[in-house]
Amino acid sequence: MKRILFTICIWAALFGVAGCDQESTIKTAIVAYIEANGQEKAEAYLDKLVADGRLGSANAEAIKAALPQGIEKVKEIINHLGDSK
């Protein structure tokens, strides 16, 4: 049951919560997913976000490269996504 509720929360975050920046929401959802499901499932999740057009492939690859270095490195990478805009 907890897993179902968590999944619903993730999808709600991805579709945007009123008043929240979509990019920030997606970043938060990615970190939450990784923390809850681990590296292996995170890679498939990132691929799905790319396929859905919610995350660029270069950004997904940067996050995947950071996964083996731990969640703090992933957060660092995610927080710098879009800095070059």
Image (cartoon, rainbow, N blue to C red):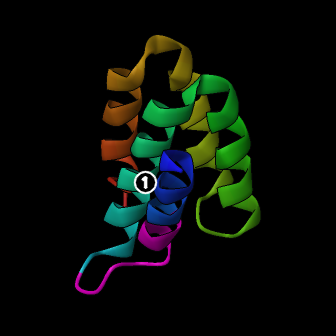
Q: Which residues are magenta?
A: 11-19
The answer to whether residue 72 is above or below residue 50 is above
Q: Is residue 43 magenta?
A: no
Q: Is residue 16 magenta?
A: yes
Image x and y of residue 51, in percent: 77, 62
Horizontal side of residue 45 vs 63, given as left or right: right
Viewer-proximal residue, 58 or 35? 35
The answer to whether residue 44 is above or below residue 76 is below
Horizontal side of residue 69 vs 41, given as left or right: left
Residue lying at the far top in this picture: please name it: 69
Residue located beneath label 1 in the image: 29
User: At x 68% / y 26%, what residue is drawn?
Assistant: 40
User: At x 65% / y 47%, what residue is drawn?
Assistant: 46
In which quadrant of the rendered view does residue 74 lie?
A: top left
Image x and y of residue 50, in percent: 69, 58
Dot 1 alpha-carbon crowd within 10 angstroms: few under 14, some 14 to 19, many 20 or more: some
The answer to whether residue 20 is above or below residue 47 is below
Dot 1 lies on which element? helix
Image x and y of residue 5, in percent: 48, 58
